[in-house]
Image: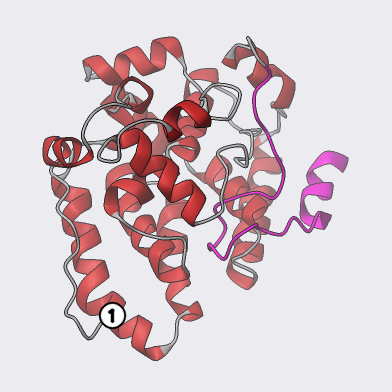
Amino acid sequence: MFKLCRLFKLKKKSIRSNIGIRSSYSTATEKDETFEEYFEKHHIPISNFQRLLLSVGSAATAIIDPYRADMVACLGETTGFLALEYMCSQMEKSEEGSQILKEKPRINTNTINLEILRSMPHNTLAKCYLNFLEENKVTPDSRDPVRFVDDVKLAYVLQRYREIHDFAHALLGMNISILGEITIKWFEAVQNRLPMCYLGALMGPFLLNSKERNDLSKYYLPWAIETGMNSAFLMNIYFENRWDQPIDELRKELNINPLILPKSS
């Protein structure tokens, strides 16, 4: 119980304005560390009662302070069991998704070489992803480890979801502004059904100004929902094997069409 209490006392500030997506410290895997080893190192077994307490506490904290990335992450782990089962089943139906579940690749600076990505052609997934990281001053090393999911396969599914979040940004052309994050959260909520995605999508607009809320309702929200419903399931994409794929070709394959805004927006 002491470990659980500490979670609510730690004031981990997000490194970006993001309604609780990114932690402020590095959690890159050690070289040659399997996900099973990583899971054992970070896993915290809890009872059903403790899970309930964490769910209520993290939800309340995340609503009061959407910048508490640790609480949003905790909420995803304690309330997302059915969604994780759904995501896992969708991956198992896909050859590429099944390969991901089998190999359990990780995305951080110990597993990808940013210098190699920097040398790749401008129209590739690699360059699009790298440009997103550099333009928004973010790093793939800042994802919280999954702690409160007991099943190692489902824990990996949630870890994978966190680690491909920046790919969703790059593919959908969304920056890390609050409006951009809310748009991504709606897309992810439709695709993945995670309760914490819906929470971020619904609470985030309170952080917007009136013009941004108007743009969200008129343009971003309808596009995010339609794109989430009609595009391929991103959890099934083995991005690490597609670095050299032209980004326009990948978007066409995934059925992701860019958001086109009026010139005044």
The answer to whether residue 186 is above or below residue 178 is: above
Q: Position of residue 245 (x, y in %)?
A: 23, 28
Residue 148 lies in quadrant: top right
Q: Residue at the spot x=35%, y=30% of the render?
A: 120
The residue sitting at the right extreme is: 2
Residue 72 horizontal side relative to residue 165, left or right: right
Badge 1 element: helix
Identify the coloring. Answer: secondary structure
Residue 102 lies, in percent from the top left, at 40, 10
Quarter location, residue 26: top right
Q: Is 208 in front, or is 152? A: 208
Residue 204 pos. (x, y %) = 46, 70
Q: Residue at x 84, y 48 (%)?
A: 6
Q: Is residue 1 visible?
A: no
Amino acid identity at mark 1? Asp
Q: Is residue 237 magenta?
A: no
Looking at the rendering, the stretch of residues picked out in magenta corresponds to: 2-30
Q: Position of residue 100 (x, y in %)?
A: 37, 18
Q: Residue at x 55, y 38 (%)?
A: 140
Residue at 44% in and 35% down: 118
Residue under circle 1? Answer: 215
- Relative to 111, 174 lies left or right: left
Q: Check the image and report above or below for 8 versus 26.
A: below
